[in-house]
Image (cartoon, rainbow, N blue to C red):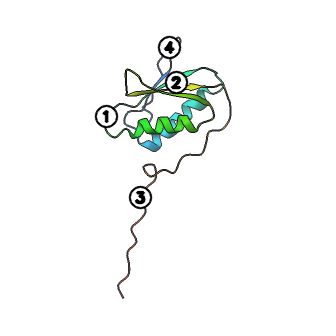
């Protein structure tokens, strides 16, 4: 299921819609987009995550942007809090390993004690 879409205009900033994705799916999509645009210094990529709810996807975009060596700046939307822009620095290379934060991993299994 791919919901992210690139805007077709060549002169504009590419936009990717992350609505409806889980945190893990959004992180994978962000890393895929960064790989697609790596090596382009000063390239801006706009991620649309929405402003409602708990802001999990917005947090994922910001966290991936801060951790990825290909991103020079993370710019939250000034007039629109439902978007975040990542500015690339032109570096090529691998992305950091996915984070293992609480909201990205599954809850631990319940351990039941046996009755004796």
Vertically, is 108 above or below 81?
A: below
Place of residue 83 in the rendered image (x, y in percent of width and height, measured from the top left)? 41, 27
Give the spatial CA distance, label 4 vs label 3: 41 Å
Give the spatial CA distance, label 1 vs label 4: 26 Å
Place of residue 6 in the rendered image (x, y in percent of width and height, measured from the top left)? 48, 23
Label 3 Cα crowd, 10 Å radius (few <14 / some 14-19 / many 20+): few
Give the spatial CA distance, label 2 vs label 1: 21 Å
Q: Earlier in the sequence, mark 2 or mark 1?
A: 2
Q: Secondary structure at mark 1?
A: loop
Q: Residue furthest bottom?
A: 116
- Label placed on residue 14: none
- Label placed on residue 45: 2
Question: Residue at position x 45%, y 30% from top?
Answer: 4
Asked if the residues shown at circle 2 and circle 1 are in contact, with their CB atoms under 8 angstroms apart, the answer is no
Q: Earlier in the sequence, mark 1 or mark 3?
A: 1
Q: Residue furthest right?
A: 92
Q: Earlier in the sequence, mark 2 or mark 4?
A: 4
Q: Secondary structure at mark 4?
A: loop
Q: Which residue is mark 3?
A: 107
Quarter-of-image position of residue 73: top right
Give the spatial CA distance, label 2 vs label 4: 10 Å
- Label placed on residue 12: 4
């Amino acid at each position: 299921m791919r919901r992210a879409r690139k805007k077709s205009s060549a002169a504009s900033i590419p936009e990717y819609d992350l609505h409806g994705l889980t945190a893990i799916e959004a992180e994978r999509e962000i890393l895929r987009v960064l790989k697609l645009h790596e090596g382009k210094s000063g390239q801006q990529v706009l991620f649309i995550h929405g402003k409602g709810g708990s802001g999990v996807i917005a947090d994922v975009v910001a966290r991936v942007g801060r951790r990825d060596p290909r991103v020079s700046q993370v710019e939250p939307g000034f007039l629109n809090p439902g978007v975040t822009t990542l500015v690339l620095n032109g570096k090529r290379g691998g992305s950091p390993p996915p984070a293992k934060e609480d909201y990205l991993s599954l809850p631990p299994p319940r351990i039941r004690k046996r009755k004796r």
